[in-house]
Amino acid sequence: MISTRRLGPITRILLARTVAGRPLHLASAYLVGRTLIDSGPPATARALVGLYRRLGVERVVHTHHHEDHTGGSARLRRKLAIEIFAPPATVAILARFDRVPLYRRLVWGRPRPVDATPFSGTLEFDGMRLEAIPTPGHAPDHHCLFDHAHGWLFSGDLFVHPKVRYLRRDEDPWLQLEGLHRVRALRPTLLLCAHAGMIREADAALARRIEFWESLARDARRLRAAGYSTRTVTRRLLGREGGLHWVSFGEFSKRNLIEALLGGERDL
C-alpha cells in the first residue's frame, strides 16, 4: 500500500505491506522538494521507484538504520542513482545489514545492504537546514532531524505515539526520554513522525509522551516498593500482553517496558 498526504510543502508517503487488502503496519517517509526523509520498508521499494522517478527525488536522508526506514534505499540507489545520507553509525550498519527476525521480515520485507554518505552536524537541501540531533534509546544510531527555520522536527521513531506501551528488549526508555526532552527544548512547531504522522501541536504531543512514561515509571516504582512482582505491576498498569508480544516472540512486550523503567535510577 502506498498513499500520500500533503501539508504545505511536505508530502507524507504512507507505506505498508498488505494482507487481504489491509496494511500490516504503517510507516512513513517525508518528501520536501527533492529530498526524502527515510525511504520506507523493503516490501514497498519496487512500487516506490516509479513514484519517486515522477516526483524527481534526488536524495534520501536517514534517521536510523531500521528496515522500515531504510528498506527502500538499496533499490532507489540501484534504479535511480539517488544519493543517500545517514549518520556515521547508520552508514556502517547499512553497509552490511544483518538479518532481521522473521516477524519483521514478514511485516517489512528483507533489507539489502546499501552504501551511504555519512553526515553529522547539518545538511542543507531544498530550503531546509537539517540538524542531526542524537537521540539514542530506540536504536543506538537514532537521530532526529530538525529544521530550525521552519520548526520542523523529523522524529523518526522517537515519538511513535503519545502512549507507547510496548518496548523491544534492546531499547532503553530512559535514553529515549532524554531525547524527548532534548528535542522538546528545541520548540518544534511541527512534528513529523514515521508512524503517528504530521502533528501540528508538537510541544503538547511531546509533553504527553514524556509524561506518560515518567508517570508510568513513578507508578511502577510505587507498586514494586509495595512488594508486587514485575508481572503484577505490568498487568496493573498496562494490562495483559497483546498480539505484538506474541507475534514477536516476546521481543516487544509491555513487561520489557516496565522492567526497563524499574531498572533505571533516574530521578523523576
Image (cartoon, rainbow, N blue to C red):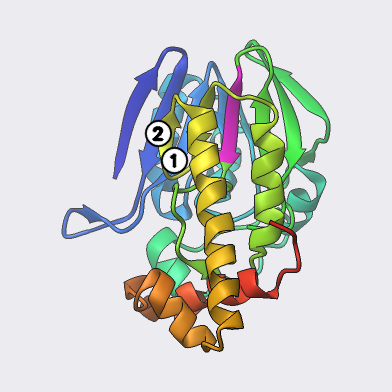
In which quarter of the view is residue 183 placed?
top right
- Report if residue 152 lies within the magenta region: yes
User: Where does the magenta region start and end?
Assistant: 151-155
Q: Are marks 1 and 2 in contact (CB under 8 Å)?
A: yes
Residue at 78%, 38% in the rendered image: 117
Residue 101 locus on image (x, y percent)? 52, 75
Residue at disc 2, secondary structure: strand
- Which residue is at the front of the view, 194 or 92? 194
Q: Amino acid at mark 1?
A: Ser
Q: Main secondary structure of the magenta part?
A: strand
Check disc 1 and report the residue beneath it: 28
Task: Say the numbered circle drawn on residue 201.
Answer: none
Label tally: 2
Of callouts 1 and 2, the N-terminal one: 2
Quadrant, the C terminus: bottom right
Give the residue at x 70% y 31%: 185
Number of residues whose C-alpha sits closer than 10 Å to that of mark 2, classed few (under 14), some (14–19) or many (20 or more) = many
Identify the disc placed on residue 13.
2
Q: Is residue 3 above or below residue 210?
A: above
> Is residue 148 in sight in this rendering?
yes
**Amino acid marked by disc 2:** Ile
Disc 1 from disc 2: Cα separation: 5 Å
Q: Position of residue 2 (x, y in %)?
A: 32, 39
